Amino acid sequence: MDARLLEKLNHFLALEKKLRNASSVQQVAQIASSDSQALLHFDSCVFFSGRQLKPLAASNISVIDATSSEIQRWRQLLGQHFDKARQRSPLQLELSQPGNDSASETGNKEHSDQRDTIETKYLVLQTLGKDGNEGCLALLRSQRFSDQEREVLRELGGAVTQALFAVRGARQFSLRHWFRRRPLVFAALITAICLIPVRQSILAPATLAAIEPRIVSALTDGVVREIHIQPNAPVQREQLLFSLEDAEVTAEIDRVQQEISLFQERLRMTRQYNFQQTSAGHKLAQAETDLAIRKLDLDYQKTLLDKTRVTAPASGVAIYTDPAEWIGRRIRAGEKVMEIVQPDARQIQIDLPTQDAITLPENAHAVFYATSAPLAPIEGRLIYHSLLTTEGENLPASYRLLATIQQDQPQIRINTRGHARIYGARVPLVYYLLRRPLASARRWIGM
């Protein structure tokens, strides 16, 4: 074997060993740009890293200044010809002028008459990685690179790329290729994921309702004359809440009282006449009966008068709408006007749509999220599940659910609306994800 060829081979093997022992990208760049000079005999070399082509190291220079004019000239040359270098690497260029950015490819013979006066340089660009993703090696010297030297440079570029991969841990990993080589492992993994038990849950409209509110309704037909309390005001037992118009009842009481006075006078005269004629006893009984009837009528009218003044059946907070909506409004006996509730005695009232109904265990866990305070959940446990459905104006057919509160948020007011999440039993993940799609498909298919 030729001694020169053996020497180059030894240089190349020593260079590869240094690259394998490199511990950082900076060290790989320094070895590629400086230690390869004995192998390729170039004048200068610059290592550009990554897609951004950042100058990282240069031959025989410990620290590189990326803002220097020489490095900017190298970057300008590289930017002009990097696309060609990615298509055909290594790419050799002949620089006709040392300070000019214009360049032509190998074999360009123009301006041959000026070559005696203008120094000619040859620039070789060797991309690293696939399509130059790892960077580029730029070598410059005064003599043309032979085909053997370019082949050595190509092998050097491969060795530098492998060293960069080893240092960065950038080994290419294709998930598709891995699954293609291991179909059984992939199938087992998907099956295991589908069988992961998860807690089934549903989201339904809910309200923070009072427990056993006391309904305040009208005791008789009439027109609301006055409401004596403001909405959401605290009240005491037997406190006057509202009054109905009592003009007719008052007039009827006055009439009955006048009749009672008249019949009392008639009874007195009948008793005097009874002392004179004993045969007038039946008239005395008739007068007493008429007076008793009028007194009963008076008691009845007073009872009607009392019914026009509605009082609180218990202590608590009175909840109703704007007083202007009630004053002057005719209401019937038994019609609800307001509620008396205890602010601390409340529960979660849930309207669960029938299409979202799932099997719920006893004392299922429920969490209420108020629309006004979504970051302050109220936790509870189900205590009631209706078997009958109800339909609201804006709600589909729903089951009524009630839940006691275990962890309350006092700042959230009663009758606040929101949504409640109810947690059921654990089911496989595939059932949790496909429950609604399967139900929709069944309706469309008609199974």
Image: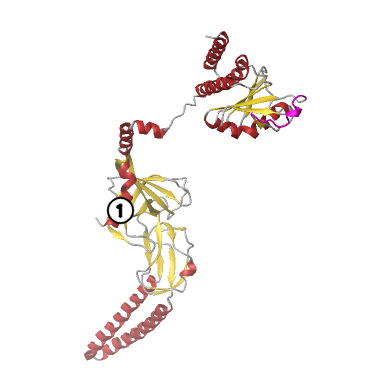
Task: Kindly tell me whether residue 434 is visible in this rendering.
Answer: yes
The boundaries of the magenta stretch are 106-116
Q: Looking at the image, how many numbered discs can be counted on the residues?
A: 1
25 on left or right of 111: left
- Colour option used: secondary structure
Where residue 167 appears, as percent x and y from the top left, is 52, 21
On screen, residue 278 versus residue 218, left or right, reads left
Camera-nearest residue between 176 and 431: 176
- In which quarter of the view is residue 294 placed? bottom left
Residue found farthest to the right: 117
Q: Quadrant of residue 152?
A: top right
Residue 199 percent location from the top left of the image: 33, 41
Residue farthest to the left, as pictured? 279
Q: Is residue 431 magenta?
A: no
Q: Position of residue 73 (x, y in %)?
A: 70, 29
The residue depicted at 49 percent of the width and 24 percent of the height is 169
The amino acid at mark 1 is Ala
| Residue 301 spot, x, y in % from top left | 36, 76
Main secondary structure of the magenta stretch? loop
The quarter of the rendered structure image containing the C terminus is bottom left
Can residue 423 be seen at all in this image of the molecule?
Answer: no
In the rendered image, the vertical position of residue 108 relative to residue 292, given as above or below: above
Location of residue 403 with respect to 52 vertically, above or below: below
**Residue identified by numbered label 1:** 441
Q: Is residue 416 left or right of residue 443?
A: right
Local packing at callout 1 (Cα closer than 10 Å; few below 14, some 14-19, many 20+) is few
Question: Observer-nearest residue: 121 or 171?
Answer: 121
Q: Residue at x 40, y 51 (%)?
A: 419
Helix, strand or loop under label 1: helix
